[in-house]
Amino acid sequence: MSDRLKILVANDDGIEAQGLRALVDTLTERVGADVYVFAPNGQRSAASHAITLRNPVSVWPVAYSGACEAFALDGTPADCVAVGLKVLKRKGIEADMVFAGINHGSNVGTDTVYSGTVGAALEGSIQGYPSVAVSVDSHKATHFEYACNLVVDLIRKTSGKWDESVMININTPDAPAGEIKGVCYTVLGEREYENDVQVETEGDVMTFVYGGEAVLYESDENQYDVIAIENGYASISPLQKDMTAYRAGDLLADWRIGK
């Protein structure tokens, strides 16, 4: 059995996505890891942390150069991680880390709530593994170099080990590595969209289409991930599965609901 890092890689753009290819190549060629791919058989963006409860999830092997093994699934990104870890354990393989990405499109601010990429990485964290989501800020992303450099640096400096309750969320501009201004350690900002829901009516039927353009902010507050990306920096944010609003404890005490 190899003593190299064993990394499960998932995504939400599907098994054929260019960003997934870039991440697998980086982990195998530059990190020297054993990579196991578990990815959806098609596009699953905005699946958030959904898992499949009422239907079976099918898993089948696919050819994927560079990976030790690769599988396509007809489930969600979070399914890919949960099922993938189970499949590996059945084979006697214990993963060291979970990566999700590289996503085509940033996952910053409130978009993280909807993100299948972040949902997949959070599933890895919930399962007890150091987990990372990686995204590039364009749905037609072509520049993955800087994101890949950050992945390599993260693994080298952490040895792939940290408190698994913390999930790392990496986002970079879609620009050549030499044009990115650097890295900001950030917290979640606000992500707003203009005309985010369009409605069409035909008879009694209303059709809703999600979309719209992201609102751009003129600000130098690069401590927020949304603004750092807009200003040409890469963003690294620590996220967690614990959604408790601790500061609201006093508010509940004041309300005395049920007391």
Image (spheres, grey):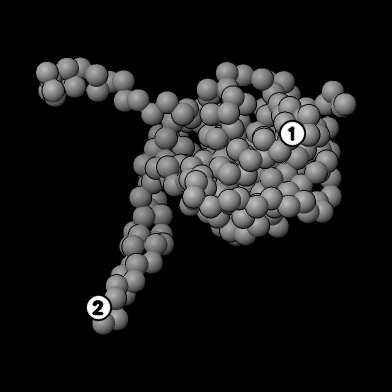
Judge by depth and name the residue closer to the eye, 203 or 4. 203
Quadrant occupied by the N terminus = top right
Say whether disc 1 or disc 2 marks the residue closer to the N-terminus. Answer: 1
- Helix, strand or loop at disc 1? helix
Q: Report whether 191 appears left or right of 33.
A: left
Q: Nearer the viewer, mark 1 or mark 2?
A: 1
> For this rendering, which residue is in front, 189 or 52?
52
- Is residue 207 among the parts visible in the rendering? yes
Q: Which residue is mark 2?
A: 204
Crowd band around label 1 with a 10 angstrom C-alpha radius: few (<14), some (14–19), many (20+): few
Residue located 60% across and 38% down the image: 82
- The structure residue drawn at horizontal position 24% and vertical position 23%, both measured from the top left corner, is 248
Q: Is residue 18 left or right of residue 62?
A: left
**Image location (x, y in percent) of residue 62:** 78, 54
Amino acid of disc 2: Asp
Mark 1 near mark 2, Cβ–Cβ under 8 Å? no
Closer to the camera, 244 or 235? Answer: 244
- Provide residue 99's location: percent of width, then percent of height: 65, 37
Specify the label residue 90 is tagged with.
1
Quadrant including the C terminus: top left
